[in-house]
Every structure is written in structure tokens, then in C-alpha cells.
Image (cartoon, rainbow, N blue to C red):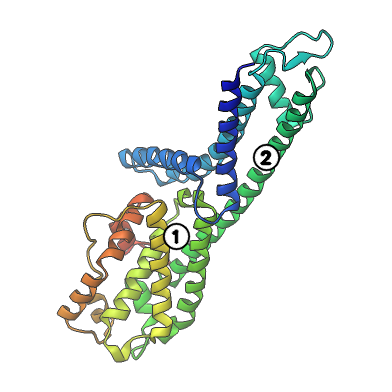
Amino acid sequence: MHPLLVFFGAVVLLATWVDIVWTTLGTHGGGPLTRHLNAGLWRAALWMHKRRRNHRLLSFAGSTILITTLVFWVAITWLGWVLIYSSKAASLVEKDSHVATDLAGRIYFVGYTMFTMGNGEIAPNGPRWRILTAICSGSGLAAISLGIAFLLEVLSAVVHRRSLGAYISDLGGTTETIVARAWTGEEFDSLREHLLSLTSQIHAFTDEHLAYPVLHYFHSENERAAASLRLVALHETVFLIAEGARKDKRLPAMVVEPLRSAIAGFAHVLSAEFVEPEHDEPPPPPLQTLRDANVPTVDDATFAAAVADARDLRRFLYGLLHDDGWTWEEMRAGKALDGKKRK
């Protein structure tokens, strides 16, 4: 008997199940193992993307990371049980000859037991090993069931993520287009219902990131459905209207402020798990956009002071774009509903 193998196997299984339960059933981000694995894979994908910009290639990273996570959970669970069975040479025996199995036989037995109920060729030797075999079978079934359920929930959240990006795109996609469509010559009231709807969607989007942290790594090659790209454009638009338009021409605070708070809450969640704010502040949204649309505006100094007050959040949004493989220039250019590039 090798107690150290039992100890290491138990530690591996415990760490794996803490990670699985934390990630699949928790609402506080990814487990300690999953978080580092996924972040490392995403950094590698971003590194390749920066060397040769290819949004289509980067769009496969999320699916790859998700599948790798599921395989990792199964593989580590498998390893833990192999270590435990390897602690005693005669823990498993050939059913007909009663000869103790070798390492290959133990790996084979654990795999069969986790994925099925065993094949009868190899049997546990004694009551202790029979009980452990039943637990091994249950852990394999639980890991696969939780993994499949997690996979389906993540794919559903990916659809919601892309729907959010598409919704903002259909409002206009860029600050200039949204302002031009929303301004009636007297007010921005046509944006009211859209902003109220987007507020609730952003809250749900934030909660999905907490429940399914791997969602952050699903990149959309289509600018129209790229949630991070469009969410930053939405913030810049709402910020411009809320701080740049003259007070009597702004939307009511009860329409604008909940949306701005929802975006700030999203930033807080992602800054704790994924995104580092950029050191540099991005360019401010051009006040001239409002003036070109004949919207009465505040003076330049007042607007500059508002931009300075929003520095931290805007630096985070700058970092969010970079962490998702986009640039500030791509956000500013965007694609409107008609598909034409904006300068």
C-alpha cells in the first residue's frame, strides 16, 4: 500500500470537484483551476491574433476553451482515480485469472468505470475497492452530466451575448448614427424605451458572466454581433448625450442613469475576473457629433470636466476592447445597419 498515492489522488479529486462545482453551479466566476487554464488559453489566442489579425480565427477560441475545460475536468478526475487505484498493486485483478492489473489496466478500468458501468474484464479486489469503484462511477457520471449542462447553458448565453450586440447595432451601431437617428430636432425621446430595455439586458449579461465565466472568451467575428464592441459604443453615445447635450435637451435621469450604472456594474465584475484597465485614456467622444446634428450642447470646458470624471470607467472599456481583440478605432468606425463603414 502506498499512502502517498492515496493522498495525492484524493487531493486531485477534491481540487477538481471544487473547481467543477464552483464553475458550473456557482455565481462567483470560474473555479481556481479553470480560471487560470482559460485565461492562459485566451492570452495565447490573443497573442496569435495580434501577430496576424484574424477575427474569424479568434472566434473559434471560445469553443476551443470550453471544450478544453470539459476535457480537463474529465482527465483530472481520471488521473485522481488512477492514483488511488495505483496505491495498491492488487486493487484490481483480471476477472478470470485473478492476476493484478498493471498501470495500463488501471487506466483502462477507470475510464470504463467513469463512462460506463465497466466491462467485466477487470474487477475490484475486495469490498473497499468495490465501494470506491461505485464512487468512481458516480463521479464520472456527475462530471459528464454537469459538463453537458454547463455546455448547453454557455451556448445559450452566447446567443444572448450576440443578440445584445446586434440590438445595439440595429440602433445605429456608432455614436454618430445613433445620435442622427434619435435626435428629432427637439429631443432624444425615441431612445427612451430602447435604453430601458438595454438596461435589463446588460444586467442579465453581467449575471451570465458571473455564472459562466468562459462566456468572456467567445469572440464574434461579425462586428454587428460583437457585444463588447457595441457595448462600448453604446456607453460613448449615452455619455455624449448625458454630458454633452444641453440640460434641457437630455433624456431623463431615470432613463439614462440606470443604464450607465448597469455598464459600470458590468465593468466592476469583469475587472475583478478578466480585464485590466488600459493605462492610457481613450479619446473622448467628439462633442462635434452633437453639434453636427444641431443638438444644443454644453461648452467644451464643461464637457472636458465630465470626461475627466469618467476616466476610470472609460479606461476599463478601452481595456475591454483590447482584451476582446478589438481596437478603439474599430469601435469608432463600426458598421451601421446598412453595412457601410463610418469614418
Residue at image location 44% in from the left, 57% down from the top = 226
The residue lying toward the viewer, choosing from 341 and 190, is 190
Q: Quarter of the image holding residue 320?
A: bottom left
**Total number of numbered labels?**
2
Give left or right: position of 300 versus 106: left
- Residue labelled with disc 2: 144
Mark 2: amino acid: Ile
- In the rendering, at what x and y percent does residue 10 appear? 60, 31
The residue lying toward the viewer, choosing from 333 and 282, is 282
Q: Quarter of the image holding residue 258?
A: bottom left
Residue at image location 21% in from the left, 57% down from the top = 280
Report the quarter where the C terminus lies.
Answer: bottom left
- In the rendering, at what x and y percent does residue 81 appear? 64, 27
- Residue labelled with disc 1: 227
Mark 1: amino acid: Ala
Secondary structure under badge 2?
Answer: helix
274 relative to 313, above or below:
above
Report the quarter where the N terminus lies.
Answer: top right
Residue contact between numbered discs 2 and 1, judged by CB atoms under 8 Å: no
Residue most toward the right?
96
